[in-house]
Image (cartoon, grey):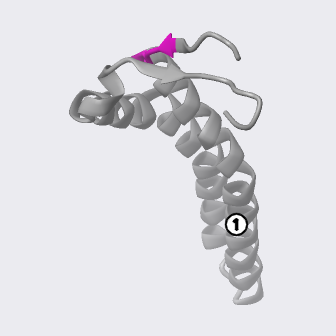
Amino acid sequence: MFDPVTYRITYDDYLSFSQLHQLRSFKPFSIYMVCLVAVIVVGSLYAGQVDTAVGAFGGGILAIVGLPIFGRFVLIPWQTKRTYREYDLIHEDMELALSGKAL
């Protein structure tokens, strides 16, 4: 019905997909970290250890902010480049065609 389309996935496409996937997992990570830090801070304050509570709060804020930034700009590009280089089939041209029945 339609002419087939030939395309190839580039490294930039693959990197964009990986970074988009990381954005989807950011919210659950943040909720988990906030709950973990809250439990540690409340437990430390209950035990009378204010220094531990302040340290846990500061470390939690650094983790919530720092880990996603490290992942997005260092870890994900490194893993994506390695995977893209090792995955031979992604370097080949792919063909996509539409018909009246299916893709």
Q: Is residue 35 above or below residue 6?
A: below
Residue at 70 percent across and 89 percent down: it is 47
Q: Is residue 31 above or below residue 94?
A: below
Q: Where is residue 70 drawn, in percent x and y?
A: 48, 36
Q: Quadrant of residue 3?
A: top right
Q: Where is residue 83 drawn, in percent x and y?
A: 31, 36
Magenta run includes residue 9: yes
Most foreground residue, 42 or 36: 36
Most foreground residue, 12 or 102: 102
Most foreground residue, 37 or 21: 21
- Identity of the residue furthest to the bottom in this view: 47
From the viewer's perspective, is 75 left or right of 41?
left
Which stretch is magenta? 6-11
Reading the image, the residue beneath label 1 is: 32
| Quadrant, the N terminus | top right
Q: Quadrant of residue 76?
A: top left
Total numbered badges shown on the rendered structure = 1
From the viewer's perspective, is 44 left or right of 85?
right
Most foreground residue, 102 or 39: 102
Q: Is residue 49 above or below residue 56?
A: below
Q: Residues within 10 Å of mark 1 (few under 14, many from 20)?
A: few
| Quadrant, the C terminus | top right
Residue at 43 percent across and 22 percent down: it is 94
Which amino acid does the dot numbered 1 rest on? Answer: Tyr
Magenta run includes residue 10: yes
From the viewer's perspective, is 88 left or right of 84?
left
Q: What element does badge 1 sit on?
A: helix
Q: Is residue 21 above or below residue 78?
A: below
Residue at 70 percent across and 37 percent down: it is 102
